[in-house]
Image: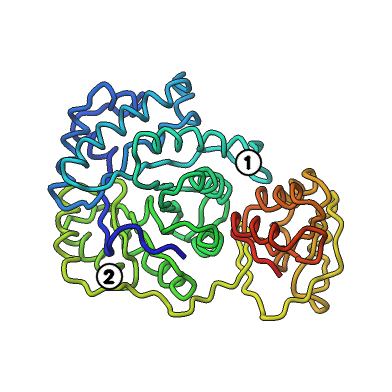
């Protein structure tokens, strides 16, 4: 795994939307266009976050992709709007000597079985925004408030066309799940294998509500964890004042979360209190010496693997694949092996593979077909080395997508 790109613990800034609304920004219309037209408000807020102790500025661009700008007829303004907002942020960051992290939000689109979009279209639109942020000088990327593993993987693969660090956060409900049923552990297993620099939570949960989810994944993590909670009190309608918010965030840090920031409601005053609370916390944060991350995954499940894997008889990738996976006798094998002969097979596996009760392995006879299987499957696959593809090519593809070769 790559070393942390910034010194830990690392303090990000807070919320943009709620603070800008308090400063007079209207709640209707395109936020990004309003910021381009009213740069003084953004400059003031970012300067307040820096004065409070933020060690980086995140660009206010989570919805500056073609996905969202198209709602306002601005899909042809991706480069213009991202460049404008990045340069405002960069000016403030350079004055303070801190990095600029390019922020990308969820697409709002879903691939089968959750929707009708296709994975490549997600990738292309993430790549468009990432290219603009990279060319303007981003020091890293934050894939924020993500709601599906497909979005996360598409954005990570797009960001991996650069050499910049990648942080990913999920937006989960009180049960710890996104709208597609994804949770923190499958994302951690999948994304850290793909080489991201940090994984964590953001969105509607308070620090106290996030704590048990981070505690659950600690034995499996090899990378820093990131928390961007909001200030809603979990047991009432009140909001956490800066001091209480900072105290709850300190508990996250002491547990092992080493990159801290805030989502809706987190003001410069909250960041200032947080800066005071984390001062002097001993480092390094907790990471297990030997993380238990030898595992395969789907959108919703993690399968911790034995030292010896027993593959099933090869399953044909047909319209009955889901039923075949459900019916597989797990007393005879501990891994479901699926033969992939074409890109269509790869797409079928991606759509039905989540039905398996066992970890999934694929066997392909050509490199393009193997690449498709690894690209379109939302999770972490095992690749059978028992095929006609040379081992070095299998391992190169597996490394790109975070797969396991066996």
The 10 Å Cα crowd at callout 2, few under 14, some 14 to 19, many 20 or more, is some
Q: Residue at x 46, y 18 (%)?
A: 73
Q: Is 379 or 391 nearer to us in this picture? A: 391
Q: Is 176 or 268 nearer to us in this picture? A: 268
Tell me the quadrant of the picture where the C terminus can be found.
bottom right
Is 203 placed left or right of 325 in the picture? left
Q: Is 196 or 170 nearer to us in this picture? A: 196
Determine the CA span between mark 1 and mark 2.
Answer: 38 Å
The image quadrant of residue 322 is bottom right
The image quadrant of residue 389 is bottom right
The percent position of residue 207, horizontal first and vertical second, equals 31, 61
Residue 120 in the image: above or below residue 80:
below
The percent position of residue 106, horizontal first and vertical second, equals 48, 42
Task: Please report whichever mark, 1 or 2, sits nearer to the chain's N-terminal start.
Answer: 1
Is 334 placed left or right of 253 in the picture? right
Residue pointed to by mark 1: 119
Residue 228 in the image: above or below residue 255:
above
Residue 311 in the image: above or below residue 347:
below
């Amino acid at each position: 795994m790559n070393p942390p790109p910034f010194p830990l613990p690392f303090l990000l800034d807070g919320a943009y939307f709620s603070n800008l609304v308090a400063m007079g920004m209207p709640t209707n219309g395109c936020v990004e266009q309003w910021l381009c037209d009213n740069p003084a408000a953004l400059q003031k807020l970012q300067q307040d976050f820096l004065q409070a102790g933020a060690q980086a500025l995140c660009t206010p661009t989570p919805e500056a992709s073609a996905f969202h700008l198209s709602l306002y007829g601005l899909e042809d303004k991706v480069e213009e709007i991202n460049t404008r907002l990045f340069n405002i942020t960069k000016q403030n960051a350079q004055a303070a000597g801190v990095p600029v992290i390019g922020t990308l939000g969820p697409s709002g689109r879903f691939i089968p079985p959750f929707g009708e979009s296709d994975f490549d279209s997600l990738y292309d639109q993430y790549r468009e925004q990432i290219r603009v942020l990279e060319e303007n000088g981003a020091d890293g990327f934050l894939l924020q408030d993500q709601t599906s593993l497909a979005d996360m993987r598409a954005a990570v693969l797009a960001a991996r066309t650069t050499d910049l660090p990648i942080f990913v956060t999920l937006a989960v409900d009180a049960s710890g799940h996104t709208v597609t049923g994804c949770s923190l552990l499958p994302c951690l297993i999948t994304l850290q294998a793909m080489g991201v620099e940090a994984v964590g939570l953001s969105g509607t949960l308070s620090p106290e509500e996030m704590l048990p989810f981070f505690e659950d994944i600690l034995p499996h993590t090899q990378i820093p964890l990131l928390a961007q909670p909001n200030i809603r009190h979990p047991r009432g309608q009140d909001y956490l004042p800066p001091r209480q918010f900072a105290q709850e965030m300190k508990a996250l840090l002491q547990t092992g979360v080493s990159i801290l920031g805030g989502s809706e409601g987190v003001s410069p005053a909250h960041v200032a209190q947080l800066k005071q609370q984390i001062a002097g916390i001993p480092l390094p944060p907790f990471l297990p010496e030997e993380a238990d991350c030898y595992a395969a995954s789907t959108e919703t499940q993690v399968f911790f693997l034995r030292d010896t894997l027993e593959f099933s008889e090869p399953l044909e990738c047909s319209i009955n694949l889901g039923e075949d996976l459900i019916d597989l006798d797990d007393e005879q094998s501990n891994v479901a092996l699926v033969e992939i002969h074409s890109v269509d097979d790869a797409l079928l596996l991606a759509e039905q593979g989540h039905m398996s009760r066992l970890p999934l392995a694929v066997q392909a006879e050509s490199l393009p077909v193997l690449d498709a299987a690894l690209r379109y499957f939302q999770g972490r696959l095992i690749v059978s080395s028992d095929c006609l593809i040379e081992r070095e090519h299998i391992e190169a593809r597996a490394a790109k997508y975070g797969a396991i070769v066996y």
